[in-house]
């Protein structure tokens, strides 16, 4: 996890992030494991911080060398009580699912994943 180095007004300088954007990888080992971790992170953001990313894609998911996921680029995040929260969450989840379907042939139902992220289902259908 990058550490904050300095702050000036609205800018925070952070330490280096090890890894690369998910979009840069040709092989990620076990894509099911990575997908589960992405959705677990989104579930934590939803349930603990009450936030929806609102712009998630393979370009703002960092895969560390150890295989763990870091989700970046949160300035456009919205609270879970936002008027368009459900639509934004479903769009986020669908973006990830389309990428994993196209790149790794993993197919999941966005409605089922949504139930998991919002806490209505205990596990992912993976």
Image (cartoon, grey):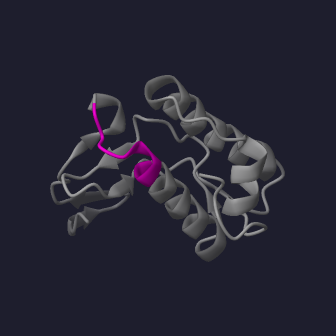
Q: Nearer the viewer, residue 43 or 105?
A: 105
Q: In the displayed structure, does residue 6 sit left or right of residue 74?
A: left
The image position of residue 119, as x and y in percent, is: 73, 69
Magenta stretch bounds? 27-34
Residue 5: name its quadrant.
Answer: bottom left
Q: Nearer the viewer, residue 9 or 100?
A: 100
Q: In the displayed structure, does residue 66 sit left or right of residue 44?
A: left
Residue lying at 30% horizontally and 40% vertically, measured from the top left = 28
Residue lying at 34% horizontally and 61% vertically, measured from the top left = 9
Indicate whether residue 33 is drawn in magenta.
yes
The image position of residue 18, as x and y in percent, is: 17, 52
Q: Is residue 123 above or below residue 84?
A: below
The image position of residue 89, as x and y in percent, is: 70, 48
Point out the residue furthest to the bottom here: 48
The image position of residue 114, as x and y in percent, is: 73, 53
Q: Nearer the viewer, residue 117 or 71?
A: 117
Instruction: Locate the N terminus by quadrant.
Output: bottom left
């Amino acid at each position: 996890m990058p550490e904050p180095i300095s702050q000036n007004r609205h800018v925070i300088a952070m330490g280096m992030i090890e890894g690369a954007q998910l979009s840069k990888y040709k092989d990620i080992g076990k894509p099911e494991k990575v997908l589960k971790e992405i959705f677990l992170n989104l579930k934590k953001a939803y349930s603990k911080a009450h936030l929806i990313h609102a712009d998630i894609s393979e370009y703002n998911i960092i895969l560390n060398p150890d295989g763990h996921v870091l989700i970046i680029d949160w300035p456009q995040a919205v609270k879970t009580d936002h008027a368009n929260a459900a639509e934004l969450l479903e769009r986020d989840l669908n973006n990830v699912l389309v990428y994993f379907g196209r790149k790794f042939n993993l197919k999941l139902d966005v409605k089922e994943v949504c139930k998991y992220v919002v806490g209505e289902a205990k596990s992912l259908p993976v």
